[in-house]
Every structure is written in structure tokens, then in C-alpha cells.
Image: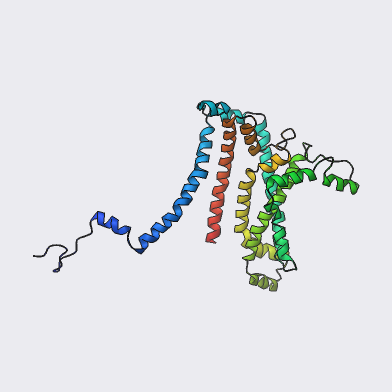
Amino acid sequence: MSRPGQGGGAHAAPPAPAAARRSRWRGPRARARLVELGFLVPAVVYMLLFFGYPVVQNLLMGFQEYTTRTFITGEAPWVGLDNYRAVVSSAVFPQAVLNTVLFTVGSIAGQFVLGLAIAVFLRRRFPLNGVLRSLLLLPWLIPLIAASAVWRWILDQDNGVLNQVLGALGVPGSPGWLTSTSLALLAVIAVNVWIGIPFNTTILYGGLQSIPEELYEAGALDGATRWRAFRHITWPLLRPVVTVVLVLGVVYTLKVLDVILGLTQGGPANSTQTLATQSYNLSFQQFDFGQGAAVGNLLIVVSLVFAVVYLRANRRAVDE
């Protein structure tokens, strides 16, 4: 009589659970899996340390009375929603929300329209096309605080280049681009548009390059040229890229801080104050870190909404 596992026509016994677990981590597939995990672990640790921990700490700080005294005593009493109530009921908050919306919409509209126009123009073949595309990246290479300093000099009311040029052209008066409550936000939006054009142009130009030239040749045979070609060929095929550009642009623009601080610091009379600058002022000028964190958390919520939209749009673009 043969025992299980000794042949003689008997069926082999199923492997023991411990043996099955050991065999799961052996072999080529197991080694490949370990290599994948080895590459994944540093990214997960990096995300948790440099993104997860600050976000969680900021969320907690928004519910605490966190001031300079906390650094000495180590005490940050839990105050619940008091920081949010104080921020929302402040006189600056409605103006900051309105300015954030105007700044974001104006910047995105300007960056996208000009970026798309330049990308369509650069798709044509002409001498020095590559040099021109390289020069367009210059605003991206300049540190934002340095670019803000240069634009602050250009837009200066008394000694700025812009007013001097306007004066030479016979335009009366010297507008206070950064000192007038009616012009300051417009000037800040214009500078942010200048900074964002390279990003929009680069991404949209890449999308245009993926459209087959044969489609334009076939469309030309049917009379679809220039505007009709753009409307019926370019725009439908570029739409997934457009969605990604717009959503990413909104997320980036919502948190713009250095440009506004470099130009106006939120003034004059809070006319360029946004939620990002209000969070900075509360945290690092009034040293009320709890209320500053509360405003930052509101921005995080808004950004998360657009981040979800971006992920869905990106997945749809991949599927298409």
C-alpha cells in the first residue's frame, strides 16, 4: 500500500500553506515582483514624508491655536472650527475669494488663448522655428521672484519702461499699474499670463504634433482649410490635451504666491489679495499659523476637486 506522495498511482497531496507561501516568493516572477516593490518603496516613502506629512500637519494645525507661543511652550490648544470661522468672517476673505477667482480665470484664459495661438503658429515650417521655440521657454527658466522684480521695474509708475514708452507715444498721464486699486490686479494677471504661456505652448504644441498630417491633406480635398480645418480636425483631436492643460493650469494658478508678493504683496488696499497671499500673511506676518493653515486647507480642498477632474480627464485621454 502506497502512501500519498510516494507514487504507485496515488494522487499528490496539495502543498502545505507554508510551502505555498514560500514558493510564491521564489522563481522569476517573484523576483520581478520584488524588484517592482523595490522601485516603489522609495517613491512611497518620499510621498509620505514630503507630501503626506505636511498635508496632515497642516490639516491638524487648522484646528489648533498655533502661534509663536507654541514654539516655546509646545502647546497648541484644540479650537475646533474657530480658525475657519475667524477666517471666513474676516473683512478680507470675500475680497480674497473674488480676487482668486478673477486671477485664476483671467490667467488661465490669457495663457491658454495665447499659448494655443503660438502653438498653432509654431506648427508651421519656417526658418529658425526651433530657435523661437527655445526662446519661448525663457520665462520658465527665470526664477519667479527675479521675474517679478523685473516686471515691478517695468510697471513702475514714475520710472517704469512701460509708462516711458506710453509717454513717448503721446499717451497722457502715468498709470499706476501696481499702485492703483483698479489696475493692480490686471497688471498681476498680465505678468502671470506671461509666465504661463511657455507651459501652455509646450503642451499644446506636443498635442498638435500628434495629429496626423494626412487628416489635413484629406480635409483640404473637401475644402476644409484654415479655420474650418482647425474647427473640424484640430480642435476635436486636441480636446483631451486641452482638458489636461486647463485643469493643471487651474491647480497651478490657485496657489500662485511669489508673483503677487513680488509685485504688490497683496496691495494696494487688498486689491490683489488672494487666498494664497492671505494664508501667507496670516502665517508669516501675523504669525497666526492656525488661521493661515485654515485658509491653506480651503485651497487644498479646491485643488483636490480639480485634481480629481484632471485624473478623470487624463484617464479619458489615455482611453481615447
Look at the picture and state if 169 lies above or below 31.
above
**What residue appears at the point 66 percent right and 58 percent down from the top-left corner?**
202
Q: Residue furthest left?
A: 1
Look at the picture and state if 124 lies above or below 44.
below
Q: What colour scheme does the image use?
A: rainbow
Q: Residue furthest front?
A: 72
Asked whether, in this view, residue 310 is left or right of residue 45, the answer is right
In percent of width and height, residue 297 lies at: 56, 37
In percent of width and height, residue 147 lies at: 72, 47
Q: Which image quadrant is residue 138 in?
A: bottom right
**What residue appears at the point 82 percent right and 44 percent down from the top-left corner?**
160
The C terminus sits in image quarter: bottom right
Closer-to-camera residue (282/89): 282
In the rendered image, is residue 121 in sight? no
In percent of width and height, residue 59 lies at: 52, 36
**What residue appears at the point 84 percent right and 42 percent down from the top-left corner?**
159
Closer-to-camera residue (224/258): 258
In the rendered image, is residue 12 in sight? yes
Closer-to-camera residue (312/296): 296
Q: Which image quadrant is residue 119 in?
A: bottom right
The N terminus sits in image quarter: bottom left
Q: Residue furthest right?
A: 170
Asked whether, in this view, residue 279 is left or right of residue 155, the answer is left
Asked whether, in this view, residue 279 is left or right of residue 1, the answer is right
Look at the picture and state if 201 lies above or below 149.
below
Q: Which image quadrant is residue 102 in?
A: top right
Number of labels in the image equals 0
Closer-to-camera residue (293/156): 156
Asked whether, in this view, residue 157 is left or right of residue 3, the answer is right
In percent of width and height, residue 22 lies at: 29, 56
**What residue appears at the point 63 percent right and 56 percent down from the top-left corner?**
242
